[in-house]
Amino acid sequence: MVLAGLIPRLILAGGSVLDQLFRAMRQSIIDGAPDMATELAQQALANGVDPLEAVNQGFAVGIAFAGDQFGCGEMFLPDLLMSAEAMKAAIKILEPEMLKRGSRREALGKIVLGTARGDIHDIGKNLVATILSASGFQIFDLGTSVTPEQFVAKAKEVDADIVGVSALLTTTMAGQKAVIEALDRNGLRPRVKAIIGGAAVTSKWAAEIGADGFSRNAIDALELAKNLMGKGTALA
Amino acid sequence: MRPSIQLLSAELIGRILREAFELLMSPGVRVGSAVVELLRSAGVEVGVAASDGVARIPESLVRQCLASAPRDFYLYNRQGEKAVHYGGDDVHFDPGSCCVQMLDPDTLEARPSETRDLVRIVQVTETLPQFAAQSTAVVCNDAPSAIGDLYRLLVVLQHSDKPVVTGSFSAAGLQGMIDLLAADSGSPDKLRQQPRAVFDVCPSPPLNWSEFGSHNLLDLARAGVPAEIVAMPLAGGTAPVTLAGSVTQHAAEVLAGIALHQLAGPGSPVVWGGAPAIFDMRTGGAPMGAVETAMLNMACAEVGKHLGLPTHGYLVATDSKFVDAQAGAESGRSAMLGALAGINMISGAGMLESLACFSVEKLVIDAEWIASAQRLARGIEVRGEEVRGDDVRRESLATAMFAQTGLSGEFLKLKETRALFRLEQYLPSPVIDRSARGSEPPSDVSTRARTLVDELVSKYQKPPLPEDVLRKFQAIVDRDADRAGVATALPRN
C-alpha cells in the first residue's frame, strides 16, 4: 500500500499512452511498489514496448529520482530500499526479453563487495549493494567477514572494476587496508579501484590506506562508483 | 521520595518478556561453537553445523539461569572499598569507551587517539567524584593493536584507583586482562571476591551471540569476573522499528546471554546492560543523542529491573562533532533521564560523533550534567537534623526559620542556611557560568572546560603501585606481546 502524501511524486501531465505508462513505471519505483512495478513491466511486454526503453525511460528515471530525493532529505532509507526492491522486480520481468532481443542493459560496471575480515555488520554494505544493483551495476556480494584473498580471487574471477570493503568496527578497519594491499600485491590496481565505507571510516583513513574513494552512505557510494567508472553525473 | 520515570506499564513488561521468550524459541538465537556443548548438555536444541548454530532456548532454562544470577554486586576500588553498587536504584556514571578518535581542543579536529589521551582522560576522571568508575575510554593508536585491549587496561590501572568498566577485543585479550586484574587484586580468588572491573560483552543484533561474544561470556563466568551484557539493537536497522519491538529484541538477546553465562558459571555476576539506539533513516547511523535512544535505554533497563537484575545503559553521549549546544542538550538530557530511570551504570560521558570521538573537555562539562542529574534523583528532601546544637523545631519546613527571621528576610544569616545549602544545592564547577557580566570579557563553556581540564590534570596524583605489582603487569604484557608477535617496547605513559 502506498501512503499517499508521504512519498514525493513526479508529476507530469498529459502525454501519449506510452508516456503515461513510463510515468506509471517511474511512480511505481518512487512509491516503492514491487507488485505495481512487476505489473507495469508485464504490461509493457504484452504491448510490445521495447524493454530497454521501459527501463531507460520508465523505471530507471524513478530510481534516479528516488536517489536525488534521498540526497536532499525528502526520502529516507526505508523508502529508498523499497524503491530498489521495486526496481529489481521490474528488471526481473524485463531481463529475459532484453536478452532475447540482444539489447541487454549495459552494466555500469562490476563491483565486488564484502565486509572486512572479522566484521559481521553488513547493514551498510547491503544498502550499497541494493542501491548500486538497482542503478545498473553488477554486484558480486561476498557477504561478511571476507578475507583479502577472497576479495582478490573474486575480483580476478569476474574481472571486477571496483572492490568495495565495508567495516563498521574500528577494530576491523585494518581489514580494509589488508584488502587494498592484497589488490596491490596481485597487480590488480590501478585497473581495479578500491573503495571503502563504514561508520568509523573517514576521508583521512581512506587517504592513509590509499583507497580510491570512500563514501558515507549508499547514495554517495553510487555517485562514487559512477565517477570511478567515468560515468558520473557530477551532481552538485 | 526518590523521583523516577517509568515508560513501561507492568502489563507491557509482561508482554515484552513473553515475546522475548518466544523469540528465543523461534527464530532462536545464533550461538558460537564455544557454547554448543554447554547448551546441549543443558538439553537445548542447537543446529548441527557449528557455523550455523541456532539454539532454541526454552523459557524454563532461562528462568532457572535468571534465578542463579545475583540480584546485586559491588565493584571495589584498589583500596578494597566498595565503590560501585550494581543493584537497586543506585545510579553511577563512567566515561564512554572505545573511541578511536580524539577531538583536539586546539584545532577542533578529530585525530587518532593515543596513550597520552587515555592518560589525560583517566586523570580527569580520577579527580571527578561524578564518575564512580573509569573506563578504557579510547584505543591507543600508538600501541600495538594486537594487544590494544590489554594495553588500555594497563594504562588505566597504572593511573587510577577507581573501578573500571572495560572489555576485550579477542578471547586471548580477555585472558591477559583478567590476569592483569588478578595481579592488581593480589590473586584470582581476590579478584573474584572483590572485583575491580566489569567487562562489556556484546551480542550482535539481531539475536546473534557470535563466537567471540559467546567465548567471552564463558570465560568471564568461569573467572567470576562481572560481565555486562551490552545488547545494541538499532530500531529499524537491526531490530524492529518500534521502540517496544526493539526493547523486546534487547530482552531476548540479554536473556540468551544470561543463560549462556549462568550455565557456565552459576552465580557469577552479570549485568542487564545495553547500548540500544534508533537507526537514523537518513544516515544509517546510530544517533546516541536522540531522545528515542534515551527512551530505549530507559525501557530496556526497566525490563532488567523488573527481573531484579543490575542494569546498565549508554547515555550522556552526543552525535555532534563539537562540544557545542547540541552536545550539551543531548548529553544533559540523557543524563537526567538515565538517573531518573535508576540505571546502575551509565556509560557514555565524553563522547561525541555517535561514539566515534572523545573529548576530555566534554567530559568535564558532562560531569556537570551528571551532578545535576544526581541532584535531581535525590529529589526534594525534608531536613532539620543536620542542624545540630540548636533548639529550632526540626520538623518544620519553613516556620522555624521564619520564627527567627520574622519578615526581615535575613535567611542568609541563619545557621540552617549555612548548614544546609551544600546539601540542598549542587555547587557547579567553574565550567558553569552564573556570574554577572563584569569587566572581563565573558568566556564560552568550551574555553572554561579547557581551563578546568588543565587544572584537574595538575591537581591529579598518580597512585603509588607496589613494585611487585608493576613487575607482574610487565610480565603479563611481555607474555601477551610475545604471543601476538609484537614488540614489547610500549609507548611511555
Image (cartoon, helix red, strand yellow):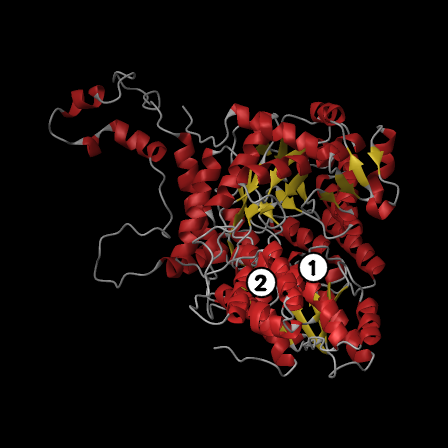
- Which chain does tag 2 point to? B
| Residue position marked by numbered label 2 in the rendering | B101
Camera-side residue: B75 or B355? Answer: B355
The residue sitting at 79% across, 49% down in the picture is B171
Image: A174 above or below B54: below
- Which chain does tag 1 point to? A
Image: A154 above or below B468: below
Image: B361 above or below B250: below
Give residue B406's position: percent from left, percent from top: 12, 24
Residue B226, located in which quarter of the rendered image? top right
Residue A222, located in which quarter of the rendered image? bottom right
Q: In this view, does B387 lie to the left or right of B159?
A: left
> Does residue A160 appear in this view?
yes
Secondary structure beneath label 1: loop
* Marks 1, 2 in one chain: no
Camera-side residue: A51 or B178? Answer: A51
Give the class, few, some or many, for how many residues have Cα within 10 Å of label 1's Cα (few <14, many ≥20).
some
Structural distance between the alpha carbons of marks 1 and 2: 13 Å
Give residue A21's position: percent from left, percent from top: 54, 66
Camera-side residue: B409 or A213? Answer: A213
| Residue position marked by numbered label 1 in the rendering | A171
Q: Is residue B117 left or right of residue B180?
A: left
> Does residue B140 appear in this view?
no
- Kind of residue at badge 2: Gln
- Kind of residue at badge 1: Thr
Camera-side residue: B247 or B169? Answer: B247
Residue B450, located in which quarter of the rendered image? bottom left
The residue sitting at 47% across, 30% down in the picture is B6
Foreground: disc 1 or disc 2? 1
